[in-house]
Image (tube, rainbow, N blue to C red):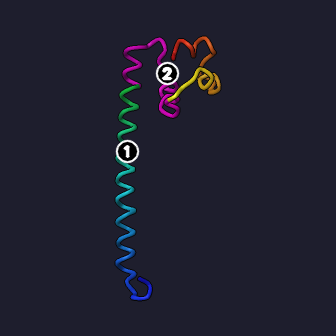
């Protein structure tokens, strides 16, 4: 490309790739936010005694969640974390 001077085509190709990935990433972020909002509402409704937005966030951040993760983040004692999970 550099030898033939086809910079414009290459730049347009790269810009299109960046735009495609940005759009895809934005859609994924939106879907994750919607799913998280759904689970926040569901936990509030179905388990109001243990509801905590922080708890939902930890589960989204660390889907394989252990009692010690909740303890480490200061969200609950071992006994309470055990009830949550």
Q: Give the percent coordinates (x, y) of residue 16.
A: 34, 66
Residue depicted at 47% across the width and 32% down the height: 60
Q: Main secondary structure of the magenta part?
A: helix
Provide the residue designation for mark 1.
28
Residue depicted at 49% across the width and 30% down the height: 63
Front tag of 2 and 1: 1
Residue 13 is one of the magenta-drawn residues = no
Residue 62 is one of the magenta-drawn residues = yes
Magenta region, residue range: 40-63
Residue 41 badge: none
* Residue 80 shown left or right of residue 33 in the figure: right
Residue depicted at 41% across the width and 82% down the height: 1
In the foreground, 53 or 9: 9
Marks 2 & 1, CB-CB < 8 Å contact: no
Q: Give the percent coordinates (x, y) of residue 79.
A: 61, 11
Q: Is residue 66 above or below residue 1?
A: above
Q: Is residue 54 above or below residue 78?
A: below
Q: Label 1's element?
A: helix
* Residue 57 shown left or right of residue 13 in the figure: right
The quarter of the picture where residue 5 lies is bottom left
Q: Is residue 35 above or below residue 27?
A: above
Residue depicted at 36% across the width and 80% down the height: 8
Report, in whole angstroms, how far the alpha carbon at label 2 lies from the one at label 1. Answer: 24 Å
- Dot 1, crowdedness within 10 Å: few (<14), some or many (≥20)? few
Q: Label 2's element?
A: loop
**Mark sitting earlier along the chain (2/1):** 1
So how many labels did they put on this image? 2
Provide the residue designation for mark 2.
52
- Dot 2, crowdedness within 10 Å: few (<14), some or many (≥20)? some
């Amino acid at each position: 490309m550099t030898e033939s001077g086809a910079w414009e085509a290459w730049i347009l190709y790269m810009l299109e790739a960046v735009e495609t990935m940005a759009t895809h990433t934005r859609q994924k972020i939106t879907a994750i936010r919607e799913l998280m909002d759904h689970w926040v509402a569901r936990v509030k409704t179905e388990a109001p005694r243990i509801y905590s937005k922080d708890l939902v966030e930890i589960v989204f951040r660390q889907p394989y969640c252990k009692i010690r993760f909740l303890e480490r983040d200061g969200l609950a004692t071992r006994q309470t974390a055990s009830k949550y999970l």
